[in-house]
Image: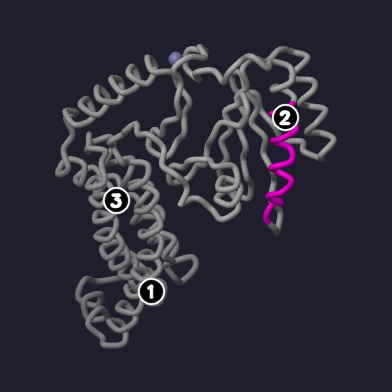
Amino acid sequence: MLWPGIKKIGKELNFKQTNSEAAGIVKNCFVKLYDGHNMKIMEIYTPQMDGDDKNAIIKKIESNNIKSYEWPANGIKIIFQEILRPYPVKKIKMIMEEIVNYFNIKYPSQKPQCQHCGQQDATDMYGINNFTLYTCNDCYRQTQRNIKNDNEEQDNKKGNYLMGFTGAILFSIPGILAAILFFIFFQTLAAASAVVYIILGIIGYKKFNGKISPIGAAVVISAGLIMVGLGTTIAYSANILYLLYNELGEIQLDTMLYFLKIPEIQRELGLNLLTAYLVSCIYFIIQLNVMLKDWKSRKSITILKEIK
Ligand SMILES: [Zn+2]
């Protein structure tokens, strides 16, 4: 989503937006703004940029106490760190104006360049999914063709949910060992094992050629849910076995089965299962969100919308 601070500057400047970036033309520069983790980011793409221009920009931003910046082709990316409170929107706008004015005075007859080929004619702003882009007509058409091919390739890619599921389960099995160790050493399971099942599950899913798609993400999570139940039960039983062995010095199947039928033991297992599911469900929901974003297979290029 577009966060309020970015939305506010974007609106003031008549920018357009994707779901997470605001972008627009200011004088002869293409400017984009978005949020990061504890930071706001501004990228300014200029009509031209040489060593002197770079030095002039460095002077301007360093005099504003900004130490974090990068140089994408024909542009600058400024990172406004936010510790505890949001970086003042006014200050971002002021720094942007200083830089844009500098380029407007230095290269008055030039326009912003296509980010792909550098030419300055027949250009417009587009969004590729959430990412904003400034390109010329030709590059737009080329990008559109590439995206179409990529999507078709993705759709035709062989990959199988059942095999992926099998892979996720098989690769998660060593996770049970981790669960057993957790039980024996910490007397609790710790839903930490849920994390292990997902990490191993994703590796297994990919190794077994599972299809990378939103359904695939749900398949990995389902395998994880099965493994949490199975792993907790096995680990808990192993823990009982371990305790009995310490107590009796030997162990027989009959004794083991007898113990597992005791209501208190069953209740404790139930409680462990419940905790493991509660904690892992929270983690799975977070993880599913991340995977849905990453594994969304279709790309598209669109014209930017007005900021609402
Ligand atoms: Zn171009």
Is 26 colored magenta in this rendering? no
Mark 2 is on which residue type? Ile
Q: Which residue is mark 3?
A: 173
Distance of label 3 from label 2 (alpha carbons):
56 Å
Residue range highlighted in magenta: 86-101
- At x 29%, y 71%, the residue is 251
Mark 3 is on which residue type? Ile
Q: Residues within 10 Å of mark 3 (few under 14, many from 20)?
A: some
Label whose residue precedes the other's in the sequence (3 or 1) = 3
Q: Nearer the viewer, mark 2 or mark 1?
A: 2
Mark 1 is on which residue type? Thr
Q: Quadrant of ligand 1?
A: top left
Q: Which residue is mark 1?
A: 275
Distance of label 3 from label 1 (alpha carbons):
20 Å
Q: Which residue is mark 2?
A: 99
**Viewer-proximal residue among 160 and 104:** 104
Residue 151 left/right relative to 29: left
Q: Residues within 10 Å of mark 1 (few under 14, many from 20)?
A: some
Residue 48, image quadrant:
top right
